[in-house]
Image (cartoon, rainbow, N blue to C red):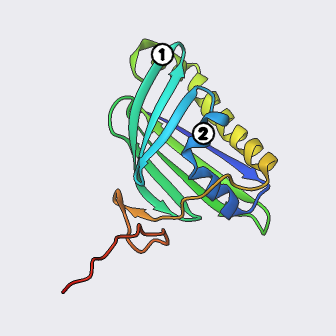
Amino acid sequence: MSTIEHSVDVDVPLRTAYNQWTQFETFPRFMEGVQRVDRPQSNLTHWITRFGGVTREFDAEIVEQRPDERLVWRSLHDPRHTGTVTFHSLGEGSCRVDLRLDFTPQGLVERAGDGLGVLRRRVCGDLECFKQFIEAQGRETGQWRGAIDGGHVLPDSGQKQPHVPTWPTG
């Protein structure tokens, strides 16, 4: 197993950086090799990536999400990985984003790329591109402020609940 850790200081308020990170659909705009990310459920993302000529699809479960603090995920199948991103205020208009990614390279190409530091450079570069993206935007493109614990969305986590019609009785 390999671990990559990287931090970046971002010149936007913590809430703005966190809110943008919850917009997985925008990841292809700043993550090289990420073709598409969908969020079919509040605690589930579906990824399509292309690295080194190899296209992969996988699902990742959001295990923990605490607004303005952290987001933790794990892949549900190959390529196996887990990750944590945390957000720390550096003052009113800036924050630090810390990323940790633990993964098991699959196959000869990924093991070689890991050994040569290719994957580390890509992940670190993607975090730097996130910084450039959100600073250029100046504001988030959306937000998801729900809380998740143990892979379960907490019911009173500040999310708008769907309207359920009630029928009169009698």
Local crowd at mark 1 within 10 Å, few (<14), some, or many (≥20)? few
Precedes in sequence: disc 2 or disc 1: 2
Which residue sits furthest bottom? 170
The residue wearing badge 2 is: 27
Marks 2 and 1, Cα distance to the nearest angstrom? Answer: 19 Å
Q: Quadrant of residue 1?
A: top left
Q: Determine which residue is flagged by label 1.
A: 54
Looking at the rendered image, the quarter that the C terminus falls into is bottom left
Q: To which quarter of the image does residue 11 belong?
A: bottom right
- Please name the residue shown 60% across and 39% down the image: 27
- The circle drawn on residue 170 is none
The picture places residue 103, in percent across and down from the top left corner, at: 44, 34
> Where residue 18 appears, x then y in whole percent?
62, 57
- Circle 2: is it few (<14), some (14-19), or many (20+) Cα within 10 Å? many
Seen in the image, is 87 located left or right of residue 39?
Answer: right
What residue do we see at 72% from left, 59% from top? 95
**Foreground of the two, 60 or 39:** 39
Expressed as whole percent of the image width and height from the top left, the position of residue 46 reads 43, 38
Residue in the image at 38% along x and 33% along y:
80
Q: Amino acid at mark 1?
A: Val
Point out residue 117 in the picture as x, y percentages from the top left corner: 59, 24
Between circles 2 and 1, the one closer to the viewer is 2
Q: Secondary structure at mark 2?
A: helix
Query: Is residue 30 something that shows in the picture?
Result: no
Furthest residue toward left: 170
Check if mark 2's residue and mark 1's residue have beta carbons within 8 Å. Answer: no
Residue kind at label 2, given as amino acid type = Phe
Q: Is residue 61 visible?
A: yes
Q: Quadrant of residue 92?
A: bottom right
